Amino acid sequence: MSAELCDLTGAELSAKLAAGETSASDVLASSQRRIDAVEDRVGAFLTRTDQLASERAEELDAYLSTGAPQSPVAGIPVALKDVLTTNGVRTTCGSKILETYVPPYDATAWARLAGAGAVLVGKTNCDEFAMGSSNENSAYGPVRNPWDTDRVPGGSSGGSAAAVAAGEAVWALGTDTGGSVRQPASLCGVVGLKPTYGRISRYGLIAFASSLDTVGTFSRTVRDSASMLQILAGHDPRDATSLDVPVPAYTDGIDGGVAGLRVGVVTEAFGEGVDPGVVASVRAAIDQLEGLGASIGEVELPHAAYALSAYYLIAPSECSSNLARYDGVRYGLRAPGEHADSIEMMFATRGQGFGPEVKRRIMLGTYALSAGYYEAYYGQAQKVRTLVIRNYEAAFERFDILVSPTSPTTAFRIGEKADDPMAMYLNDIFTIPANLGGVPAISIPSGLDDAGLPVGIQLTAPALDEPTLFRAAHALESALSLDLRPPLLQGAG
Amino acid sequence: MAYEAVIGLECHVELSTATKMFCACANVFGAPPNTQTCPVCLGHPGTLPVPNREAIARIIKIGLALNSEIAPHSLFHRKNYFYPDMPKNYQISQYDLPICIGGHLDIEFGDGSTARVGITRVHMEEDTGKSTHGGGSGRIHDATYATLDFNRAGVPLVECVSEPDMRSPEEAAAYLRELRATLESLDVSDVKMEEGSLRCDANISLRATGAEAFGTKVEIKNMNSVRSLERALVYEIERQTKALDAGATIVQETRHWDEDAGSTASMRSKEEAFDYRYFPEPDIPAMEPDAAWIDDIRASLPELPRARRDRYVETLGLKPDVARVLVGDRGSSALFDAAVSLGADAGPAANWITQDVAALRNAGGSEGELTAQHVADVVMLIASGTVSNAGAKQALEASFASGEPVEAAVDRLGLRQVSDTGALGALADEVLAENPDVVQKFRDGKEGVIGFLVGQLMQKAAGAANPKVAQELLRERLQG
Amino acid sequence: MPVEIDIEHVAKLARLDLSDDESARLRTQLAQILEHAARVGEVAAADVPPTASPIPRANVYREDVPEPSLPADEALRNAPERDGDRFRVPRIAETGA
């Protein structure tokens, strides 16, 4: 399979569109051909929006032909994780309980991209209600990693990561509550950004854990990530937790380099349980940063070890409340058959509609919030969050950027950890602290391990300092100059 | 055995803001089902609540009127429980950090005595939708299905919790009336119990008279008027007294007041153990109202019923029971204040408003509207002797029907009193000439007979004479 | 210390039908997860204040200005069962809070 339009970056496509060298319809057709070619092996999408996309591309071409000013987003094929609402387009959250749900409104994040001319190619598979690290928890079957289709793409935004890695979409949106953008980005060899909490509106992001959820981006370059954030960021009157602070020009200083930048290496992230291939690749990337003039030091986040525990109390607690609304009354599944009363209907609907991981977390959260346990669990976890934030504050007094592996392992085999929730939860050990602290973090590919699987390095910056994050990530990406095409695309056809 | 009742009230007040608490749907009563909803108040996936500034301003206003402390830091919490008419299956409410803390409301009884009822807290929350039971007889116990209308879901609701300070149904009723009048004066709610914009639940327990410890408390719901609150409490005191006298223990439970049956019944629910799992609402930032905002709201507070009663009694010299009746109805007290400011004497104005005007309004529907000018004219025309009390009443009724000024009605109906001493003097002479024996009786010391002579004079004047003037003229002649 | 969880009670609060198998598995798994999670008690001292939101804000309000609501048909479009312009559910046997 040769490189096609859909394999180009957003910036390259935008330049070609501006120069009249291609059209939005051609770009879309390229993306759709790729979906046709690989989707039976990848399974990234739950819903394709071919018809809508074609109409949209034609409208755009008509607009572009007038020579009107063009956003860097216009004409770019975008995939959306199926936890972001789309007006009139089914949105399932990877759950049976929302199999037929058609939202009456657009998520703000999607509305902003659409308003700037992005073309929706489809809604991507994910772990049910974004709960998982492997995409195996979808009610609609697993997504496969384009680098090895026996392996998971990571999760929960597995479909979005795989779609961008395989060229089915040029960009994608995911959501990141404990690493759900960064970890699959790492496992699929793409760039995944989790911005500062509140930087992008959560309106229309179907809530998992409200105090941790962020919309995040997938792309193949850091520059594209910055271009996307430019459109997505900003206050939304419909989200009271969205930040009302100015949005800087993210691509402006992106070529500034890292000379003099203080980079803190998170020491405990290179210890036990981390794949040697991951350690080697990330260490090599850190050497590159040093070679570029960054000053490297070591930093500890002593409470990061407790962050996982806190996360597995806070996220399920919030989720148990957020998912209470799926009750068979106003939308979504109602368990078939006669029900003696509304209570029984709700029990049956929720019992049949939710999968095992979702039930596990609802139960965990219900228990953690119940009378007599609140202080010991939820209350204590919120204190750990305070400690994690203090750790970051201390670390960012000494460093501009922190680096670690994104995930302790590369992509694992489908089914390998499915029966061991604790082992699965450990996948997120390096990504969770940024969610608790609300700080921005990005995962970019650092290379391949010996098995030819992608490794990701995570860079973390202080709250709202995405510009420094992009600058450092872009410098490293340029220095590494990786050519990452999954084997799926390298063979014939 | 003699018992003392211990009563506390929890009142829910729907605010009459233009929009709902957390979304921009219009807040209106009585719209066709499910026409005032949006993804937010239907609890659609992905939606988020954004609090209504005006609702927060209004609860602060209520808190100030109830002498509460306005919390410098306050949070919304989620109260988690499942119910089909609650779209998110949690209610956004407040828990340990309400907006208004403590406070009190002074109430007044029929005999003029007063009492102070403590306010525990006043907090902000959202209303639920409405379910209608269908099938069977249409009542909850044998219905076969229910239908849901979410127009009310998300309407701003203020919960006002009193201390268990009340000792009798009368005291509870007086508190509820005072609270309603206070809220009405603040212009924050329609406070219509029959439409549900003011709802009241009562907690009641009995204890042996003189005992310190509280008995087991029972919650009663579904009272939709002050009168039904009073009836329900009377019933419940009787029920609990009988139970305690029979040696039974009172079960802590919620009971439903049945207005038609005149009794309360247990509302045992299938889901017996409620555990609301409160936790801070992560979608809504804290509320930390600054002093300037609170001061602005304080400055906007109107005269509250308590102060108004005091002013009527102390400054305007009204009797306490008249003042209480006036203040109990915002329309009446507004009319009164306006009439007084137009020059009417307070006492007569109050009497006209609480008696004749009130009777006309109760009986007359809404075809006519009486203004403060009407009331002031009536009072002043009587005072000047232009019209008699009876004539004024007739004129007022005519004005109520037609809207015309009182004086115009007086003239149209020929009710103007003759105070012209010349014309009346001639008639007085006639009367005295025609009744020599009565004249003699008067002169013999039976002065009471003058009433008969006045009557005769009034008759001659076809009712248009000013009786006071008439009497003066007769007396002058008899004594002269 | 292993955590004993009344799975039936929790499932009732969460309105979840669970099979016997599911209940048994959850009993073990939740105990295991909670044992790990309980470590939060080891570090969080009494003088550490809780943080509910990573980037705290305060006083975010909406002005009291109405916007159009959904037409009833749109509001009811996803309804599993409707009755005219109302949502329909099996009988409500219990009472609200």
Image (tube, rainbow, N blue to C red):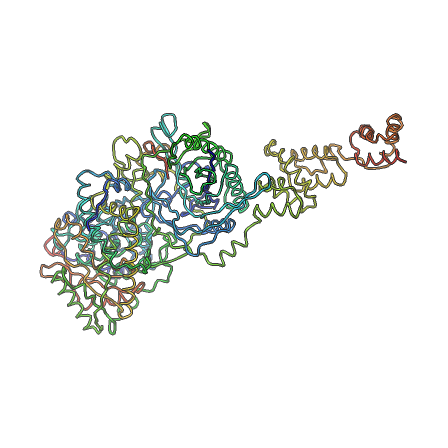
A89 and A152: which is toward the camera: A152
Residue A231 visible, this angle: no
- Residue B336 seen anywhere in this rendered image of the structure: yes
Quadrant of the frame with the N terminus of chain A: bottom left
- Camera-nearest residue between B401 and B338: B338
Instruction: Decide: is A16 above or below B77.
Output: below
Whether residue B170 is situated above or below residue B21 in the rendered picture: above
Residue A273, horizontal then vertical, whole percent: 14, 59
- Rendered location of residue A103, percent (x, y): 31, 44
Looking at the picture, does residue A429 appear above or below residue B351?
below
Q: Quadrant location of residue A489?
A: bottom left
Displayed quadrant of residue A429: bottom left
In the image, taking residue B125 as reference, residue A421 lies left or right, namely: left
Give left or right: position of B440 versus B337. right
Q: Count the marks: how many?
A: 0
Find residue A233 and report its horizontal and vertical position in percent. 33, 58
Point out residue B178 in the picture as x, y percentages from the top left corner: 53, 42
* Image: A355 above or below A429: above
Decide which of A317, C41 is in the foreground and name it: C41
Residue A186, quarter of picture? bottom left
| Residue drawn at the location 27% of the way across and 71% of the way down | A398
